[in-house]
Amino acid sequence: MLYRLRQRSGDEGGFTLIELLVVILIIGILAAIAIPSFLNQKSKANDAAAKSQVRTGETAMETYSTDHNGEYLNSSKTAASTAEIQAVEPTLSDTSSAKFKVISAGANEYEIESESNATKDVFKIKRESTGAVSRTCTSSTTGCSGAKSGSW
């Protein structure tokens, strides 16, 4: 009897077709769950780069203001340009993931933006003359935290 069991186990050398199909089905289900999750992470990373850039621009604007007697105007009393702010913070010149731009600047206020190259989402920071700071996002898709526009 023991001889027959050993001979039978020796004859079964591989997996059955059903076992292989079940494994392939499980791998397919796991891939169907994981792939959309990974694709969404790339757009989030692109938006995070644009947010980081505009936040760095905010710090550069405050540094520029400190160097110009508390105003966001240059020595000829015209608004600080994108090039002047990029001179304060050279990393703002990097346009590989997002484009930085100074929209407007006054004595006590400014508005800056950064547009993500991949998603085309635009992140803005606006400082009003009262000192209030607002952060907004405008998107043609649903990149701004699931909404077409909003604050961040």
Image (spheres, helix red, strand yellow):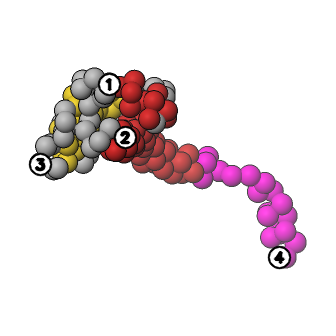
Q: Is residue 35 left or right of residue 79?
A: right
Q: Residue at x 68, y 52 (%)?
A: 15
| Residue under pointer 3 | 130
Q: Secondary structure at mark 1?
A: loop
Seen from this angle, which residue lies furthest bottom? Answer: 2
Residue density around tag 3, few if under 14, some if 14–19, many if 20 or more, within 10 Å: few
Q: Is residue 120 left or right of residue 136?
A: right
Whether residues under marks 1 and 3 lie with C-beta atoms below 8 angstroms apart, the answer is: no
Could you say which disc has been placed on residue 1 in the image? 4
Kind of residue at disc 1 = Ser
Give the alpha-carbon distance from disc 3 to disc 2, as whole Å. 20 Å
Residue density around tag 1, few if under 14, some if 14–19, many if 20 or more, within 10 Å: some
Kind of residue at disc 3 = Thr
Give the alpha-carbon distance from disc 2 to disc 4, as whole Å. 95 Å
Kind of residue at disc 2 = Asp
Q: At which x and y percent is residue 33? A: 42, 48
Q: Visible in this render: residue 43?
A: no
Whether residues under marks 3 and 4 lie with C-beta atoms below 8 angstroms apart, the answer is: no
Could you say which disc has been placed on residue 81 in the image? 1
Q: Which residues are magenta?
A: 1-21
Kind of residue at disc 4 = Met
**Total numbered badges shown on the rendered structure:** 4
Quarter of the rendering containing residue 125:
top left
Give the alpha-carbon distance from disc 1 to disc 2, as whole Å. 15 Å
Q: Secondary structure at mark 2?
A: helix
Give the alpha-carbon distance from disc 1 to disc 3, as whole Å. 22 Å
- Whichever of labels 1 and 3 marks the residue nearer the N terminus, that label is 1
- Whichever of labels 3 and 4 marks the residue nearer the N terminus, that label is 4
Foreground tag (3 vs 2):
2
Foreground tag (1 vs 4):
1
| Residue under pointer 2 | 67
Q: Secondary structure at mark 4?
A: loop
